[in-house]
Image (cartoon, rainbow, N blue to C red):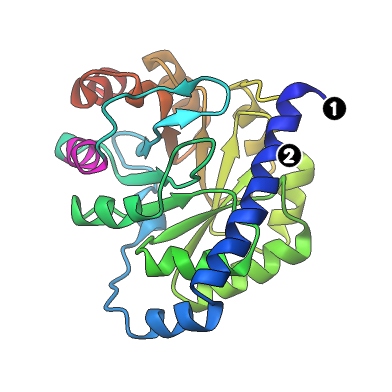
Amino acid sequence: MNELHLVLKKILEKKFETIKHKKEILPEKEIFKKIEKHNYVHRDFKNSIKRKKERISIIGECKRATPQRGIIRQDYNIEKIVKEYSLTKLVDAVSVLTEEHFFYGDLYHLVLARQSSNLPILRKDFIIDEYQIYESLYYEADAILLISTILNKEQLKDFYIKAKSLSLEILFEVHSLEDLEKVLELNPEVVGINNRNLENFVVDIKNTERLIKYIPKGVVVASESGVFSKNDIKYLSDLGIDAVLIGSYFMESSNIKDAVENLIL
């Protein structure tokens, strides 16, 4: 097991600890009661990220840090970032990384993102417990990420059913054909092909090309990670994908609007 695989293991171990602590503070029954009283209006994630006639769709990510590189955006103001995404008129949904210890995220960032824009909000995290689905809705996400690399078939199915019962959408993330086979059994509506291998964190944008041919028509497909240029956008667009999820490129930019336009226009 190499060092970066150990990073993923540490993330998951810490996540188990964090969830246990949260359940002690706000038990599952209590958070469910809060959800039932919640005045929440769902925003359509899937249809927002479907491919446009003139371009592929963009999911703009809010990400303060990564485990490998540490902080990548010093001025991490969620409200400002999401407003900038929204003002471009080229970003179609927002992804918010909420993992606290390695990405320096925060669940409340979902609320701030929602207040700052009318765009659908995706919670991006390492979801390994049903409790996280409840809290995703409580903190006003419209969709959640389920990483098939870290979940077995039963977990994927159970979490999918639970999320749908709460009107939450799912972005199933896959990296390998093995991941994809698990997901396709569930007749997914949205699949994200992660170009980053979570076992060694190496990014290869051609991973999208390798997997897209196995995804049935009608499924909305997003490509995640490794997009840094117009050539990358053209390459992925020519493959016929619906959307790209872009984080680091935008987070490293001093002007998000310019960064979005430089990629798309």
In this rendering, would 190 be left or right of 199? Answer: left
Can residue 97 be found in the magenta stretch? no
Q: Are marks 2 and 1 in contact (CB under 8 Å)?
A: yes
Q: Which mark is residue 112?
A: none
Farthest residue, direction right: 1
Q: Is residue 26 visible?
A: yes
Q: Position of residue 239 (x, y in %)?
A: 53, 30
Q: Position of residue 78 (x, y in %)?
A: 27, 41
Q: Magenta stretch: give its range.
A: 78-86
Question: Percent x, y for residue 11?
Answer: 64, 41
Question: In the drawing, what numbered circle is on residue 1?
Answer: 1
Q: Secondary structure at mark 1?
A: loop
Which quarter of the image is occupied by the N terminus?
A: top right
Quarter of the rendering containing residue 83? top left
Identify the residue shown where x is 33% and y is 47%: 93
Choose top left, top right, bottom left or bottom right for residue 174: top right
Q: Main secondary structure of the magenta part?
A: helix
Please state if 88 lies on the left or on the right of 30 as rendered.
left
Nearest the eye: 74 or 60: 74
Amino acid on which the number 1 mark rests in the picture: Met
Q: Which residue is mark 2?
A: 9
Residue at the location (31% across, 24% down)? 74
Whether 179 is drawn above or below 154: the answer is: above
- Image point (69%, 55%), residue name: 183
Q: Say which residue appears at 50% left-offset and 41% top-offset.
A: 222
Q: Which three-letter amino acid code belongs to the residue tagged 2?
A: Lys
Q: Bin the neighbour count of mark 1 within 10 Å (Cα to Cα): few under 14, some 14-19, many 20 and up.
A: few
Residue 199 visible at all? no
Looking at the image, tell me whether mark 2 or mark 1 is earlier in sequence order: 1
